[in-house]
Image (spheres, grey):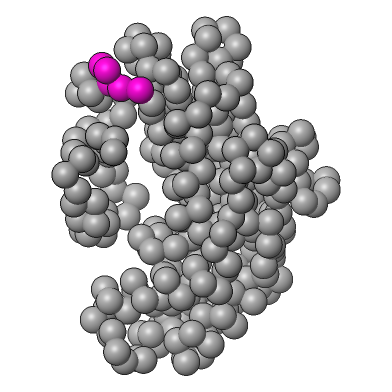
Amino acid sequence: GFTVVGIDAFTPYYDRTTKERNLRTLDHGNFRFVEACVDSAAARVELDGAQAIIHLAAQPGVRDSWNEFDTYTELNVLATKRLLDFALDAGVHRFVCASSSSVYGDAPAYPTSEDAPTVPRSPYGITKLAAERLSVAYALERGLRTVSLRFFTVFGPGQRPDMAIERLIRAAHLGDTFPMFGDGSQIRDFTYVGDVARANAMCALVDLPPGTVFNVCSEAPTTLNQVIEIVETITGSEVRRDQGAVSVGDVRRTGGTAARIRAALGWSAETSIDTGIRAQELAVRERLQLVGARA
């Protein structure tokens, strides 16, 4: 029932045609797309009369952030600062900001709560923490109702092509080799994109204390080796692996507790890792035109 304006700059982190294909799934009468940077004058015009901003724009990726820190600072920190200023100027009532489990680094305890120390181990994590803290500061000092959501390894249909589950499914179907960083024992709290979208929508529609920070996680940590086994079972194909060293800045484990967002909003993840991978595998098969067949 809401009118939604999507704003995206189509930065060249991955192929534009992939982004355009994802955009076509949003063909809806109440949705309109604007190609622009989120901190541009064109974006500012769209904010007049808006009730809420869900700020998901960022430069992703841990590995590249070591060599392209200026880009990450510009797109993750400075752009967020300008967008917060736009929100204040336009009188936007709620501001939901995408943070990341990367802000924790190697957490001292699992499951990790929002009160755990934030010690990111990569420039990417540092910029995501900076954006989150800016959002909190605008809440405390400027009165903007901000909520920061620490996402834990989001997966599902439409996932970025550089992410592990997307690459695993493609490797299984096409017979490609999957480059694996480490021995596969690393643990992630994989969270389905539909559950993440629902958390964003709930936070945009409900008044919460300004500066609120929530984990958004499945509370079901899974090893990469377990994910590979699920993909192999679903596709009926073995994944050939090319094992390499662990990437600098990658943590061994992530795993959060969603107790705080559950208590405040009644939100919890509803989609299991198996069900979510099945949905993502079907989307990949349709894209590869393999529906009805197992390649």
68 or 29: which is nearer to us? 29
Picture quarter with the N terminus: top left
Query: Would you say residue 247 is visible in this rendering?
Result: no
Quadrant housing residue 134: top right
Residue 72's spot in the image, x, y percent? 45, 36
> Visible in this render: residue 22?
yes
Q: For the point 44% across and 39% down, which residue is it?
A: 201
Q: Is residue 54 magenta?
A: no
- What is the x, y in percent for residue 190? 59, 60
Q: Quadrant of the C terminus?
A: bottom left
Asked if residue 258 is positioned above or below residue 43 in the image, the reply reads: below
Q: Nearer the viewer, residue 199 or 85?
A: 199
- Tell me where the magenta segment starts and ends, as one range: 47-51
Instruction: Please name the residue shown 71% across and 59% down the image.
Output: 252
- Left or right: residue 214 versus residue 203 is right
132 relative to 105 in the view: left or right: left
Q: Answer above or below: position of 70 versus 81.
A: below
| For residue 172, above or below residue 268 | below
- Residue at 67% x, 69% y is 223
Side (left or right) of 65 relative to 31:
right
Residue extending farthest to the right is 109
Residue 173, image x, y percentages? 38, 85
Q: Is 280 left or right of 10, judged from the image as shown?
A: right
Which image quarter: residue 140? top right
Pick the residue in front: 50 or 149.
50
Residue 189 lies, in percent from the top left, at 64, 58
Question: What's the magenta bit mostly, secondary-structure-wise?
Answer: loop
